[in-house]
Amino acid sequence: MKIGFIGLGNMGGPMAANLARDHAVTGFDPVAQPTGLTLAASAAMAAQDADVVITMLPDGNILRAVAAELHPAMKPGAIHLDCSTVDVDSARAVAAQATAHGLHAIDAPVSGGIGGATNGTLTFMAGGPLPAFEAVAPLFAIMGQKAVHCGAAGNGQAAKICNNMILGVTMIATCEAFALADKLGLDRQAMFDVVSTSSGASWSMTSYCPAPGIGPVSPADNGYQPGFAAELMLKDLRLSQQAAEAAAADTPLGHAATALYAEFVETEDGRGKDFSAMLPRFETRQRP
Ligand code: NAD
């Protein structure tokens, strides 16, 4: 396949590099200029001959602007595969615009982070027409280990923000429980041994334990270097609340988690730390 790849940052760079081993990839990014890829002078030039154009961009506004440039330049019947994490409304607007240009659109945000992008082990959650999803499935297989079709346009983004809202809430709950256990004199290893095999278990405890030296190796064992940075968790939680607002859904814990990560990142010292660094934050605090 001929592939255009727009947005060659922390995630897009390694994803494009993995695809370039098997496919003809032409990339574009105004800032990042990775070696080993054919680079074009504009997004439109990277897209014009492509069967599939992949975008991996920071947010919905940038995606909308790039899509407005890309879609008129793409050949009829080509597929726009957006892997960025953006708001559901932007994903659906971009898909509608693609259809109006005789193109197909798939929104397929990822989980797995920079390690997953580099190692080709991402998980994709995709929305859009099934035939287009099936057409890009071989590309998912190169960039990742799993791709789930979640339904119509925007449903990939919906799945991503619902998952990450659960993750933000369970990480906070796990961290505050560890900090409470400390103050009650409960040994952290004992706490892990009980909770990881009891009804309080979650991925945050069993696979990404926020306490250093406990459970599997995680960013807590590396001074809370990300991993998954607190500011990226805040971005996803804000997208969940934007969607909840638009859909009139009541999400009190998602709302509280968003407020807590906003405080951590914007008024405390959370920026640049892994999102599990909520544990040292709680350790040092007293009950208000
Ligand atoms: P990044 O900032 O490293 O990369 C984004 C790239 O987009 C940059 O290189 C930037 O120059 C480029 N860009 C900006 N405007 C552009 C334009 N108009 N045209 C072309 N390129 C443009 O960000 P990232 O970490 O690679 O994340 C990309 C997306 O993946 C985001 O939506 C993010 O939420 C999502 N994501 C990131 C992670 C992670 O761990 N980093 C994990 C899952 C999902």
Image: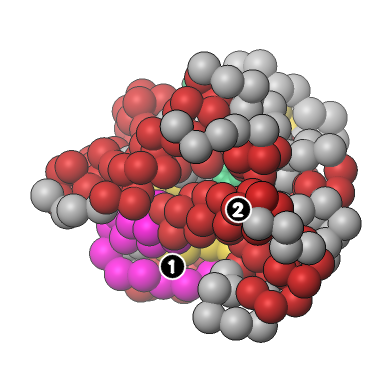
Is 147 placed left or right of 106 in the picture?
Answer: right
Q: Which residues are magenta?
A: 144-164
**Residue under circle 1?**
133
Q: Residues within 10 Å of mark 1 (few under 14, many from 20)?
A: many
Residue ID at (62%, 61%): 204
Residue with the most extreme front position: 184
* Residue 269 drawn above or below residue 165: above
Left or right side of 251 for 16? right
Residue 172 percent across, percent down from the top left: 53, 50
Residue at image point 79% right, 47% down? 220
Between 135 and 142, the one nearer to me in the picture: 142
Q: Residue at point 27% right, 50% down?
A: 252
Q: Amino acid at mark 1?
A: Phe
Q: Quadrant of residue 34?
A: top right
Q: Amino acid at mark 2?
A: Leu
Q: Label 1 vs label 2: CA separation?
A: 46 Å
The answer to whether one can see residue 176 in this image is: yes
In what element is the residue under mark 1? helix
Is the shortest distance between ligand 1 and the CB of mark 2 under 8 Å? no
Residue bearing the label numbered 2 = 180
| Mark linked to residue 91 | none
Q: Nearer the viewer, mark 1 or mark 2?
A: 2
Does the rendering let one see residue 231? no
Q: Earlier in the sequence, mark 1 or mark 2?
A: 1
Whether residue 40 is in magenta: the answer is no
